[in-house]
Amino acid sequence: MSTPIDAKGKACPIPFMLAKAQIDAGETDFIVEVDNKAAVENLKRLAKSQAFSTSVEIGDSTFRVAFLRSGEKQKSDNPAPQPVSNGQTTANYVVFIGDDTMGTGTHELGRNLVRMFLYTLDQGKDLPSSVLLMNNGVKLAVDDEQCIGTFKSLQQKGVDVMVCGTCLNYYHIFDKLQTGTVGNMYEITQRFLAAGKVITV
C-alpha cells in the first residue's frame, strides 16, 4: 500500500478529486486521510461507484478512509431518466436551490413560497433529474418538516436530492440532515454540466 494521502484541511472537492486521481491511475489499494464527515461520505460514495470497498478508521479529529478494489465499476454516475409512479418521469433538467426562501421580502413568505414550489414540482408530470441544495438552501433538508417530506417523496420517485456537504459543515448542521445525499462540488458541477436546463430558485 502506498503512503496515505493527506487531505486534512483541504476544501471540498479536493479530497474527492485526490482519491479519484488514484483510481484513474489504476491504484487498487490506498488510504485518504480527512478531517470531516462530509469528506468521508463523499469518499465512500466515490468508492461504491468505482467498485471499491471502504473501511473507516476514526481518530481524535481525523478519519482514515481505506479504499480496496472489489469489483467492476458502475457504468454511469448519471442514469437515464426513468418512468416513475402516476405517469411521472424524471427529465433532463435540475433544480438549484441556493437559499431557504424564494425571492426577496419577509422570510416567512419566502419560506412558504419555497414549500409551495417544491410541492407543486413533486405533483407534476416531468420531474427534475436532480434537486441541488447549496448555501442556505441546505437548511430546507434539515429543519423544515414540509420540505423534508417533499424531498423524500421526490427521492422515492427517482429524483436525486443532493445537499452540499461543505455548506452543512459551515452551518454546523451536518449531523442534523434529515434527507438527501451529501455531495461535493465535483458531483454538483457534473450534474449542472449534464443537465439540459437548470432552474434556479
Image (tube, grey):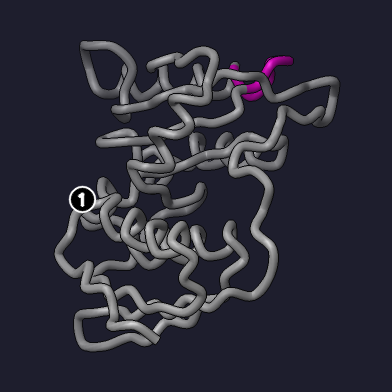
- Of 55 and 164, nearer the camera is 55
Residue at the disc numbered 1:
171
The quadrant where residue 127 appears: top right
Residue drawn at x 38%, y 26% as measured from the top left? 97
Is 29 rendered above or below residue 114?
below
Question: Extreme front residue here?
Answer: 25
Total labels: the figure holds 1
Circle 1: element type: loop
Apparent side of residue 147 relative to residue 167 in the rendered image (left or right)? right
Q: Position of residue 137 (x, y in %)?
A: 33, 34
Residue nearer the viewer, 7 or 22: 22
Asked whether 83 or 26 is in front, the reply is 26
Residue 113 or 122: which is nearer the viewer? Answer: 122
Q: Residue furthest left?
A: 9
> What residue span does the magenta drawing correspond to?
121-127
Task: Name which residue lies at 31% across and 60% down.
Answer: 18
Inspect the magenta stretch and tell me whether residue 128 lies in it: no
Within 10 angstroms of label 1, few (less than 14), some, or many (20 or more) residues? Answer: few
Query: What residue sits 63% from the left and 34% below the top?
Result: 159
164 lies above or below 11: above
Residue 115: x and y in percent read 47, 25
- Give residue 53's position: percent from left, percent from top: 57, 75
User: Is 122 included in the stretch rendered in magenta?
Assistant: yes
Amino acid identity at mark 1: Tyr
Q: Please, is residue 49 above or below residue 137 in the view?
A: below
Which quarter of the rendered picture does the C terminus lie within?
Answer: top left
Relative to 156, 15 lies left or right = left
State the image coordinates of residue 45 (x, y, percent, origin top left): 51, 60
Q: Quadrant of the N terminus?
A: bottom left
Using the rendered view, name the quadrant where residue 120 is placed. top right
The residue at 51%/74% (across/down) is 28
